[in-house]
Structure formats: structure tokens, C-alpha cells
Amino acid sequence: MPDTPILVSACLAGIYCRYSGAVEPIEPVVDLVRKGLAVPFCPEVHGGLPTPRRPCEILGDRVVDADGADRTAEFRRGAEEGLRLARLLGCRQAVLKSRSPSCGSGEVYDGTFTSTRVAGDGLFARLLKEHGITVRTEEDLAG
């Protein structure tokens, strides 16, 4: 049992915040939250984006939505707020949504909106890693 809470993507805990508006809880994550071992957080919503919202992907050094609008500022703001929360709580681990432009760890979509995956991290995952927080995805919990 961890001595500090794990930061988890709120969507994985079944909280209404996914870009599509769908609620798709991942039971191992929900269980961590129920036991008080994890704290849910959505960097995209905390960055000012609505639910639902247009899909976004990383394109070079920017985050753009499917209409081509630059959403980098919202994604950065949310990532910074998430880091602030992680530091406040003393989190050393995070379980984040795979392939998300915020939370993806190790693999994200390439910015063409063709479901093409490339190596990389979402903005929030990258920021957490840069500050020494271990990032895993829900897929890591399953495997």
C-alpha cells in the first residue's frame, strides 16, 4: 500500500470528463479511489476545456483539435495545475489514460486524426515525469 496517494486520470475513475462525454470506468482505478489510495484529476477540464469537446492530438510542439484550433494553452494550464496537486499531495506515482494528448505515456496519436500512433508522452505525463513522478497507464494495470 502506498504511503502517498496515486494521482489518476479522472476519466479512468468513471468521472464525466472524457473528450467524447462517454463514461468508461476502469475497475482497478475505481477501486484505488474507493480505498482512498488515489486522487482523480482531469488536466483537460482543469485547463478550461468543456466536456464533451473536440478530439485533440499533439502536432509537433502544439496540441490541436480536430478543427485545427490550437489548444496548447489549455493543455499546459491543466498540466501545471495537475503538477501543483501532485506536489501538494506528495504523489510519487500516477496512472493516466493511455494515448491521451494530456495523459498518454510512451505513445500518443500523431496529430493527423487518422488513429496513427507514435512514440511520445502527453503534456501532463511529460511534466510529471520531468518532476520525478512515475507514470503508468491503465493498460499497465491490466498487464
Image (cartoon, rainbow, N blue to C red):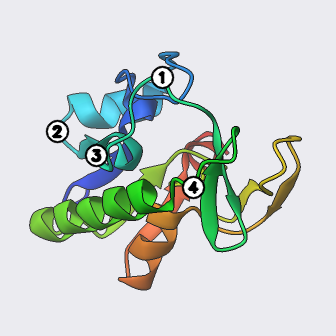
Task: Say which mark, if any, is on residue 52.
Answer: 1
**Mark 4 to mark 2: distance in Å?**
36 Å
On screen, residue 108 versus residue 5, left or right, reads: right
State the residue at coordinates (39%, 22%): 14
Tell me which numbered mark, 4 or 1, is placed earlier along the sequence. Answer: 1
Q: Where is residue 106 in the image (x, y as percent from the top left)?
A: 68, 65
Tell me the residue that label 4 is attached to: 70
The quarter of the rendered structure image containing the C terminus is: top right
Kindly identify the amino acid type of the residue bearing the numbered disc 4: Asp
Kindly identify the amino acid type of the residue bearing the numbered disc 2: Gly
Relative depth, front residue between 55 and 69: 69
The crowding category of the residue bearing disc 4, from other C-alpha atoms within 10 Å (few below 14, some 14 to 19, many at least 20), is some
- Snapshot quadrant of residue 97: top right
**Mark 3 to mark 1: distance in Å?**
14 Å
Relative depth, front residue between 67 and 8: 67
Could you tell me if residue 3 is visible in this image? no
The secondary element bearing badge 3 is classed as helix
Do the residues bearing badges 4 and 1 touch, measured as CB atoms within 8 Å? no
**Mark 4 to mark 3: distance in Å?**
17 Å
Tell me the residue that label 3 is attached to: 46
The crowding category of the residue bearing disc 1, from other C-alpha atoms within 10 Å (few below 14, some 14 to 19, many at least 20), is some
